[in-house]
Amino acid sequence: MDNISMDNLETLLDPDLINTYLVPWGIRIVAALAVFIIGRWIIKMVVGFAGRMMRKAQVDEMLSTFAGNILYTVLLVVVVIAALDQLGIQTTSLLAVFGAAGLAIGLALKDSLANFSSGVMLIIFRPFKVGDFIEAAGIAGVVEEVRIFSTILRTGDNREITIPNSQIYSAPIVNVSARSTRRIDLVFGIGYEDDLRKAKQLIEAAFAADDRILDDPAPGIAVGELADSSVNINARPWVKTADYWAVRSDLLENIKLSFDSNGISIPYPQQDVHMHNAA
């Protein structure tokens, strides 16, 4: 037993074995560890510096975090490849394998990648922000959260709807909250026998009685169309965006009551039926 142990020890301590294998591999392992450790330290410095620069430039927090993660991953892959190269591993063939695997994964997850890229574009160009009321992909609601793959909207009846980012970015986006003011477009139809000037005065009085209607831009009141059964008057006041729906509802009610009190009729489709007695 002792003789076997001594033989193994003599074999390990053989100068040719040490010089041929142990010393070169030891140096390679130490060099690879040094590259990996120093590389990670440099990566943290680079990512931290990039993060500080993006915060200084007031880049969106979600975008800066995402960009920092991508930068860290890419640089870490470079450091790992450099460390493997120190061990004598053929990194060229390894990169080819990674490339083929990445292509296969990309083809399998093309829809997810489309949502991912659309999310990045939404974060970069920012056609809307959290809290805006938008119309996108046939849905209207308040933006609750912009994620990498999807966007969360809250509708007026308090439903939460998740929309894939590719559907939002590939279609027109209407940002209702983008401007501080908004115009209300109303159409009032009156009968041909009614007093047109009186109707316009009643609409103007309803505008003047509501303090939420802005003086600049000035409201517009004009005849818009001589329709088949009515004279249509376009009424277009300007309000703050936050007051839009409340003012619109109040104007419809107040002007309808004012028309009723002053004998202004609002025509509606009617059908006359004539009865004939048979002989």
Image (spheres, rainbow, N blue to C red):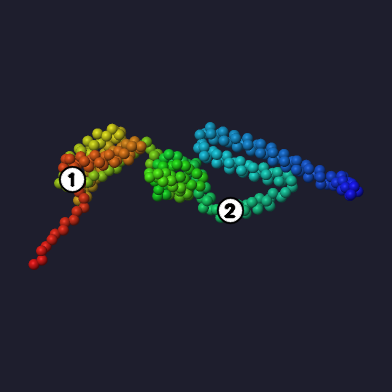
Q: Quadrant of residue 250?
A: top left
Query: Disc 2 marks which residue?
Result: 105
**Amino acid type of disc 1?**
Ser
Q: Nearer the viewer, residue 82 or 73?
A: 73
Across and down, in percent, residue 224 comes to: 24, 45
Q: Is residue 264 visible?
A: yes
Image quarter (top left, top right, bottom left or bottom right) of the C terminus: bottom left
Label drawn at residue 220? none
Across and down, in percent, residue 78 comes to: 65, 44
In terms of secondary structure, where does tag 2 sit?
Answer: helix
Q: Residue furthest right?
A: 3
**Amino acid type of disc 2?**
Ile
Q: Residues within 10 Å of mark 1 (few under 14, many from 20)?
A: some
Rendered view: 97 above or below 29:
below
Q: Residue at x 61, y 43 (%)?
A: 73
Cα–Cα gap, marks 2 and 1? 67 Å
Q: Residues within 10 Å of mark 2 (few under 14, many from 20)?
A: few
Query: Disc 1 marks which residue?
Result: 265
